[in-house]
Image: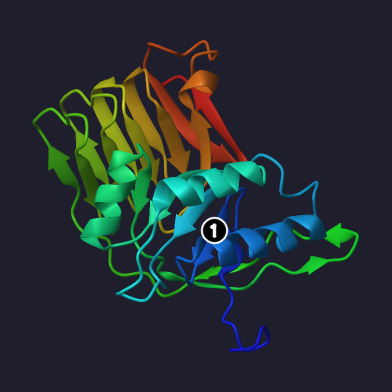
Amino acid sequence: MSQADTPPAFVLKGSMLAISILQLETGDLEQIDNALQEKVEQAKDFFQHIPLVLALDKLPEDSAIDLPAVQRLCQQHGLKIMALRTEQAAHIALAQSQQLCVLPPSGMREKFISLNEGNPQPVAEKIVEDAAPKLPTQFITSPVRSGMQIYAEDRDLVVLAPVSTGAELLADGNIHIWAPMRGRALAGVKGDASARIFCQQLAADLLCIAGIYKLGEDLRRDPRWGQSAQLILDGEQLKVSPL
């Protein structure tokens, strides 16, 4: 097979907000490395220390993926994988073994990033397709322990028990945690920028709304750390405010 006939190692996409999607179409590490090198050289300033969602939902079913090796390649090129987008059980297990969040396959149409010479454009339009009717709120009354993941599809999520470090909450709508929150919470997973996160006791590892996130190390510097708080999107910034 000639180089021209070789399928691309991946497609790099951008979200409506400040997070990018690295969509793998092969598990071949050499192809991924070469393609990353080529892409980063086009826009070195843009591809430095940016967070990524690694999308595995377009990989052929028989493709093996060495996730730790892909993570190392990304780090070598200045990229940081924050989450996986997949629905395959094997990939979800890989993500959990690497302490990564897991996102469901996208329900949006995406356009490719256009990286023009000398003027990279890191933002690509995402258009939300017709939304499914919002379902009744999902309630969780038992503790959410490390390694557990709860996804409230097309609805809000209310948790009435503690959430441990290493646990994940995902919702297409709002997330309410009326107990100590030490894990990860991702609201507005399908791109709803109006979603909010409410915490009775803010001590989270990561909080994210529609792709904009804050890590625990940033949250600890906020005056609301350890207290009740709500998180909202203001433009492309995630803001913490009192309840």
Left or right placement of residue 200 versus residue 127 in this view: left
Residue found farthest to the left:
142
Left or right placement of residue 39 versus residue 218 in this view: right
Can residue 210 be seen in this snapshot? no
Q: Residue at x 51, y 19 (%)?
A: 217
Q: Residue at x 35, y 70 (%)?
A: 63
Can residue 16 be seen in this snapshot? yes
Q: Position of residue 131 (x, y in %)?
A: 37, 69
Residue found farthest to the front:
1
**Residue 144's quadrant in the figure?**
top left
**Residue 196's quadrant in the figure?**
top left
Q: Position of residue 8 (x, y in %)?
A: 59, 76
Tag 1: residue type? Ile
How packed mark 1 is, by other alpha carbons closer than 10 Å (few <14, some 14-19, many 20 or more), is some
Left or right placement of residue 122 versus residue 80 in this view: right
In the rendered view, tell whether residue 71 sits above or below residue 239.
below
Q: Quadrant of the C terminus?
A: top left
Q: Residue at x 65, y 65 (%)?
A: 35
Colour scheme in use: rainbow
Q: Quadrant of the N terminus?
A: bottom right
Residue nearer the viewer, 29 or 240 = 29
Left or right placement of residue 156 versus residue 53 in this view: left
Q: Residue at x 24, y 58 (%)?
A: 90
Q: Secondary structure at mark 1?
A: strand
Q: Position of residue 221 (x, y in %)?
A: 55, 13
Q: Which residue is mark 1?
A: 21
Residue nearer the viewer, 162 or 67 = 67
